[in-house]
Image (spheres, grey):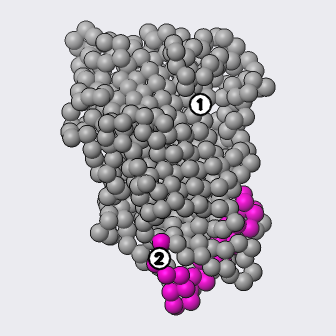
Amino acid sequence: MSTTTHGTTPGARGDSPRGLRPAMHPAPGRLAGALLARCDEAFRHGPLGGAAAALLLAGAGILLTGTPALTQSTTNCRSVDGIDKEVCVVSGRITSDMTWGNGSYWVLRGAVFVESPARLTIDAGTEIFGEFATNGTLIIARGARILANGTAGAPIVFSSDQPIGERGRADWGGLIINGRAPLNVPGGEAVGEGDTGTYGGSDPADDSGHLRYVRVEFAGTEFSPDNELNGIAFQGVGSNTEVDHVMVKYNKDDGLEFFGGTVQVKHVVLQGIADDSVDWTDGWTGKGQFIIVMQSGDDADQGIEADNNGDNNNLTPRSNPTLYNLTLIGDPDTDEGSESDIGMLLREGTSATIRNFIVLGFKEASIDIDHTATYDQVDNGSLTLGSGIIHGNCIVSGCDGQFRPDSDDGARTDEGETATMDIVTDSPNVSFVDPMLADPYNLSSPDYRPAATSPALNGTVTAAMPPMNDTFIETADFIGAVGPAGGGKDTWWQGWTDFATN
């Protein structure tokens, strides 16, 4: 999590005892109008038909009656005249197995904890709405599991309860998963930001469940000044947790953040994230493949911000993920805003293996390596890059090609050692050519596919093969997250995703 200030979060309020903002309902007249406006829009254009509209009509009944139509028990469901499904408001702590079905609309009221050993099963096509007024947030405790069973045709959607067209970053909290996998913090355990639970332990194979075809939208509420929740926070999550086909869009803080752990992710889309699209720290040693980042210049930092440990850059286990097939797209258009900084910022002692990547359109630099402990990982072969395409980055003053040398680079150069630009340039099969993506900067209707003649596909840049005996990383003979037409990896990001910007 970065502490860079990007302005006041709309609707920000003071802290509650749990670190999340206390309930404060909007004025009834304004709320009713907003709900009805979204209702009409949702019926006509909503991605799941009348579902969002139905929820909001029910929400209007809940909030505007002047009496507690729904109590503050863990779950309370009711039918509403004219609504095709019941509405279930969930609050408090879930302590036994529970299923959220697509026959209801589910509302997160405040911080909702799933406690060990409970399992929360979510059926395909289910919509869950974080309540704006109470900063609805879903937190999976250590020992609990989330079993999110979305499909390509019926994804699970966590979204804002605000009117379509008025939704925005920080409308609600987000999804937080705590596990028992190792961290490198002293004592091996930590407490999540905003008091979102204890995480960490000694089980690298810990299982927190699975996320399959899941979208998390318009989350990242601010719980203290300059501190917001991530879209999905993986806090000490283990390698037996499955994460496959996940989208996070328009989150106020990071899209995905990994606090230690060993979790592995595949087929990820991150759109319009206000801080870092991917962030890791505290000893993450997991894996990722087929990851798309698409930033918006109105509010964005790094495509990847990678740390080992900010207090002691050499704590172990050292952050050392393996990442293959990344398409990192910044926003070079200054008319859209001055942000979207660095494609990859590798710092604070992290190691990593990064292969088959595209870095395109970041304003400040394509790649930057900071801190002595990080350069030490380059020197000992633990931080390596290979098989990449870099193009169209660094449009601010002080650029040297695709890079912007800083004081860390200067110190290396003064000592006769290799700095960022030379490290990247000398990495195997890295080329500075146009990847020829179809429409990478179109926020509302992007097309990440390379042209048939793209150097990402035609062998101009040789793709790296998976590490020997690796059972997670798939063979992909192309650069970036999207493969050639008809090859099975050209449309994986379509259908279950949604690119509406508000």
**Picture disc at residue 5:** none
Q: Which residue is mark 2?
A: 73
Q: Secondary structure at mark 2?
A: loop
> In the image, residue 396 lies at what x, y percent?
44, 33
Residue 386 percent coordinates (x, y): 49, 15
Q: Is residue 62 magenta?
A: yes
Q: Which residue is mark 1?
A: 290
Of 305 and 258, nearer the camera is: 258
Which of the pair 50/108 is nearer the observer?
108
- Amino acid type at image mark 1: Phe
Q: Residue at x 33, y 47 (%)?
A: 199
How far from the left and from the top, in percent, is residue 83?
72, 77
Q: In the structure shown, which secondary structural element does the residue marked by tag 1 occupy? A: strand
Query: Are circles 2 and 1 on residues that touch, CB within 8 Å?
Result: no
Range drawn in magenta: 45-74
Q: Amino acid at mark 2?
A: Ser
Q: On the rendered image, what quadrant is the C terminus found in?
A: bottom right
Of the two numbered discs 2 and 1 on the same chain, state the one appearing first in sequence: 2
Q: Is residue 431 magenta?
A: no
Disc 2 versus disc 1: nearer the observer: 2
Q: Horizontal and vertical percent for residue 376?
A: 27, 17
Q: Is residue 436 above or below residue 10?
A: above
Residue at x 32% of width, y 63% of height: 19
Pick the quarter of the image with the N terminus.
top left
Using a 10 Å C-alpha cutoff, classify the residue at mark 1 as few (fewer than 14 neighbours), some (14 to 19) or many (20 or more): many
Question: Is residue 331 in view?
Answer: no
The residue depicted at 51 percent of the width and 45 percent of the height is 209
